[in-house]
Image: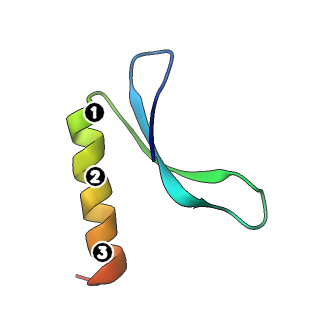
Amino acid sequence: MIRKLKSGEYRLYSRKKDAKTGKRKNLGTFHSLEAAHQHEREVQFFKRAGG
């Protein structure tokens, strides 16, 4: 999940909420939406394929 911050940057959050905290994990902050989408694809690749 990608959200735009007040600063104009984009933050990538995990899709599921953390069971302990009830919040989503911060997976990085990026200057552009394209960079955030690219990192989300990389995260999904390593979750599935393991690389």
Q: Is residue 11 above or below residue 38?
A: above
Residue 7 location (% of width, % of height): 46, 15
Residue 27 location (% of width, % of height): 46, 51
Mark 1 Cα within 10 Å, few/some/many (few <14, many 20+)?
A: some
The residue indicated by pointer 3 is 46
Task: Name the amino acid, label 1.
Answer: Leu
The residue indicated by pointer 1 is 33
Is residue 23 shown left or right of residue 29? right
Query: What sort of colour scheme is used for the picture?
Result: rainbow
Q: Quadrant of residue 44?
A: bottom left
The residue drawn where x is 28% and y is 52% is 39
Q: Quadrant of residue 46?
A: bottom left
Label 2, label 3: how far apart the Cα atoms are? 11 Å
Mark 2 Cα within 10 Å, few/some/many (few <14, many 20+)?
A: some
The residue indicated by pointer 2 is 39
Question: Mark 3: which secondary structure?
Answer: helix
Question: Mark 2: which secondary structure?
Answer: helix
Q: Quadrant of residue 16?
A: bottom right
The residue drawn where x is 49% and y is 23% is 5
Which of disc 3 and disc 2 is earlier in sequence? 2
The residue drawn where x is 51% and y is 58% is 15
Which of disc 2 and disc 1 is earlier in sequence? 1
Question: Mark 1: which secondary structure?
Answer: helix
Residue 33 location (% of width, % of height): 27, 33
Foreground tag (1 vs 3) = 1
The residue drawn where x is 39% and y is 24% is 9
Circles 1, 2 touching at the beta carbon (< 8 Å): no
Residue 6 location (% of width, % of height): 51, 16
Q: Is residue 45 above or below residue 28?
A: below
Q: Is residue 15 above or below residue 46?
A: above
Is residue 15 shown left or right of residue 33? right
Q: Residue furthest top?
A: 7
